[in-house]
Amino acid sequence: MQTPLYISKLSASYAIFLVLFSIIARGIFDLLIGYLGREGLIALVWGGFLVAGLVVLRPAIRLSKRRLVGIVFVVLAGVLYALTFDRFEERTHLIKYGILGWMLSADFYRSSKIGSQRYLIELPQRLSALPFAATTSALLCVLFVSIVDESVQHFTPGRVGDVRDVLFDMVGGLWGALGYLVAVPKPKQDN
């Protein structure tokens, strides 16, 4: 029997935040560029990425050397890939959706808290039959949130929904999901 997959309130709230923030993000970026300059905004985004990375890597202190090397490799691969983008907005897609991919993977891999009040949505059980069910389900959810996000932007004055952004979001979600997969051991199932 497969275990149902749940999305936590925190992950659902973050996904809703991503969609709603996209409505006002351009205005906020323009305001920050006016105050900080383009380089200052890029430094602020990378600083936020560094802080988020340190928060995410905090549990890595207790990891084996092999897992620690694995997560450092995943993080460095993502950072180096992000540096290849010309526009920093594309980099933010990797960061935002990388965090979402990590959070959803954590929700789906976690089995000890099922039934607690922290969970909001139960996904169909057939998803738990997929290969790498937690990672695949996390990526499907990232795809859904990304499509909703770009659809909202399409109907927002001054914004444009872009299929390329969905691809960047998926790469970010994959990056976060793989980071979680490498960093956190899967909990043991009770027999």
Image: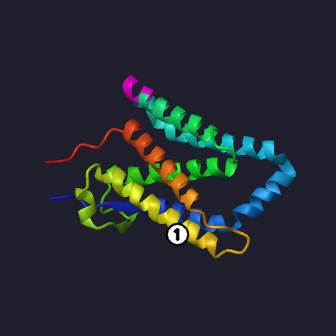
Q: Residue furthest top?
A: 65
Amino acid type, label 1: Val
Foreground residue among 95 and 58 = 95
Horizontal side of 179 relative to 48 (left or right) equals left
Give above or below for 72 relative to 28. above
Give above or below for 68 relative to 156. above
Q: Measuring 45% from the left and 33% from the top, which residue is drawn there?
A: 71
Horizontal side of 53 relative to 48 (left or right) equals left
Give above or below for 143 relative to 132. below
Secondary structure, mark 1, is helix
Q: Measuring 47% from the left and 30% from the top, which residue is drawn there?
A: 73
Q: Which residue is mark 1?
A: 148
Magenta segment boundaries in residue numbering: 65-69
Q: Measuring 56% from the left and 71% from the top, which residue is drawn there?
A: 151
Q: Measuring 67% from the left and 52% from the top, which residue is drawn there?
A: 89
Look at the image and tell me in which quarter the N terminus lies: bottom left
- Residue 115: x and y, percent? 30, 63
- Residue 2: x and y, percent? 19, 58
Magenta segment, prevailing SS (helix, strand or loop): helix
Q: Is residue 143 found inside the magenta-colored segment of the image?
A: no
Foreground residue among 130 and 58 = 130
Is any atom of residue 157 visible in this view? yes
Q: Residue furthest right?
A: 34
Is any atom of residue 112 visible in this view? no
- Residue 143: x and y, percent? 46, 61
- Residue 40: x and y, percent? 80, 43
